[in-house]
Amino acid sequence: MQDYQKEYQRWMAAELEDFDLKRELQCMAGQEEEIKEHFARALEFGTAGIRGTLGAGTNRMNLFVVRQATEGLARYILEEKLEKLVAISYDSRLKGWTFAKEAAKVLAANGITVRMYDALMPVPALSFATRYYHCSAGIMLTASHNPAEYNGYKAYGSDGCQMTDEAAGKVYKKIQETDVLTGYKTMEFAKAVDEGLIRFVGEDCKEAFYKYVLSQQVHPGLCKDAGLTLVYSPLNGTGLEPVTRIFKEMGIEDVSIVPEQEYPNGYFTTCPYPNPEIFAALEKGLALAKEKNADLMLATDPDADRVGIAMRCQDGSYELVSGNEMGVLLLDYIAKGRKEEGTLPERPVAVKSIVSTPLADKVAEHYGIELRHTLTGFKWIGEQIKLLEEKGEENRFIFGFEESYGYLSGTAVRDKDAVVASMLICEMAAYYRKNGSSIKERLEQIYAQHGYYLNSVDSFSFPGLSGMDKMQGIMDSLRKESPKDFAGTKVKECVDYLDTEKTGLPKANVLIYHLEDGSSIIVRPSGTEPKIKAYYTTLGKNKDEAKAVKEKYAKAVAPIFA
């Protein structure tokens, strides 16, 4: 009998408290491939924690996998003699509250005190609480923008950043030493509350979070009489309360919430892929924006760490703004506005990921800002803040962003923050509106000043058990036989981010091809999904010209991933 069959039989024989799991196990009896898919491997714990589809087995997200992961985290905290205090939050996903409680019960059983939110709250609030209470770790139960059948477990360090490679490696080792069905400690939730081992996040922490967000206004009070009209969608996630609270505090009164996407709903029935990067998730919001003739339509993903927008143009149409464009717009607005207000620090620092647009470098140079480049993953942006903090210079940090719609202003949170980003986007829109301009006009001015940079991403999926092996095979092939050209344009330089001496950054499975025409192509496997992403930066006199160059290269790249 194969090992995965033995594990399946072990689960079948176990006393499972979750009826859904028992029924699912019974339904897969005799289905070899189905059993193999669920039990042949275990979900791996990395710097982004764990993420997977809900269901029975070691290769699925369920209460036993959550308990196992938390036991590993607890043993790591105890062995490293870290502060015995962990913050927990969760979003609107199916089983979110259940998983949060199970994690709290395991920590409590290990003598570790928990501070958990009494209602769903987003990633930035969890990062903030981890720092506010001086916790050794934080746990966020979320699968971010994945489809409804997913959930996940993000782990944070004491600095409010997602865990470092070293810490995640130690936790993963402890997880592997823990039997998924029997190796964890747990205790009754009510007993843990009575004994003070589980406590809820206090109003003081919640109010401090909102105070921090509002402190990041560039022109405080600007929105009170700007007459801004908004449509907002939390995409059935955690953004509703914090984002609308901030709008109210800013003085924005004309806010329409997309009714079908207003309240928490882990099934995401109106947008099966609740990702603000994707047009389908914004359709209902755009329809309402047209009806209301709104200046802006904003949407935050379920854990509210990312925000996407559509802006109204002069002809009344709405145009989506990419993550790269918004990153550049916010960098430009913060730098210009803080200069005007006299609040721009000396030797200001901004940070972006290596796959984000080089247009940001041009804008930073224009304002005399040091723009640092990091690997993909917001923990690296958080690390740059920490390096400044260690020198007593954290006030030099003014902004960080990634092309995947993640932005951060301020240092009290160390992950993507759609609450502060939503505030700044609205303030920026109000600023341009009061000055007889618009976000759209400012973006065109930036392009006219620095050149038209088109940034695009294509994703290639590799599902199933063999997917990860195929992805690694593709990356190995590219390293063995590096392309000399793409669509006839020569590769000027290929930078392999496994070569730390050359990049000056930690190892990463990333290849960047710099082409002779000034374009670049970046190939990077996703850290959270079975996908390889190809990022294109192309230049042109206008959008159409840059787009034609991108399509030429995309056609040449596609066969590599076939």
Image (tube, rainbow, N blue to C red):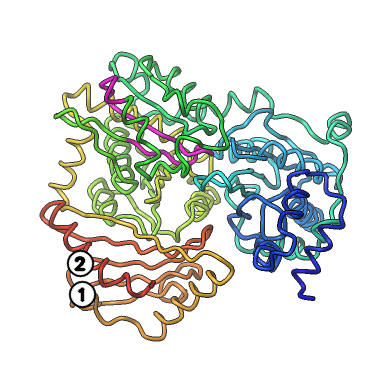
Instruction: Identify the residue shown where x is 51% and y is 50%.
Output: 382
Looking at the image, residue 493 lies above or below residue 67: below
Tell me residue 455's x, y (percent): 28, 55
How many numbered marks appear? 2
Determine if the magenta segment contains residue 304. yes
Residue numbers of the magenta segment = 289-309
Crowd tier of the residue under label 1, counting other residues whose Cα lies within 10 Å: few below 14, some 14–19, many 20 or above:
few
- Estimate how packed mark 2 is, as few (under 14), some (14 to 19) or many (20 or more) residues with alpha carbons within 10 Å: few
Q: Which residue is mark 1?
A: 487
Residue 34 lies, with reference to residue 2, above or below; the image says above
Q: Which mark is residue 552?
A: 2
Most distant residue in the left direction:
541
Q: Is residue 249 left or right of residue 101?
A: left
Name the spot of residue 457 as percent of width and height, x first. Answer: 34, 57
Res 151 label = none
Q: Is residue 236 magenta?
A: no
Q: Image quarter for residue 197?
A: top right
Q: Nearer the viewer, residue 127 or 367?
A: 127
| Residue 510, image x, y percentages | 43, 69
| Residue plotted at (40% across, 50% down) | 404
Determine whether label 2 and label 1 are within 8 Å by CB. yes
**The residue tagged with tag 2: helix, strand or loop?**
helix
Q: Nearer the viewer, residue 320 or 506?
A: 320
Residue at image point 22% right, 24% down: 433
Which image quarter: residue 523?
A: bottom left
List x then y, in percent, for residue 184: 84, 53
Q: In the figure, residue 167 lies in which quadrant?
A: bottom right
Q: Earlier in the sequence, mark 2 or mark 1?
A: 1
Left or right: 86 in relation to 414: right
Q: Secondary structure at mark 1?
A: loop
Query: Which residue appears at 25% of the width and 53% of the height?
Result: 359
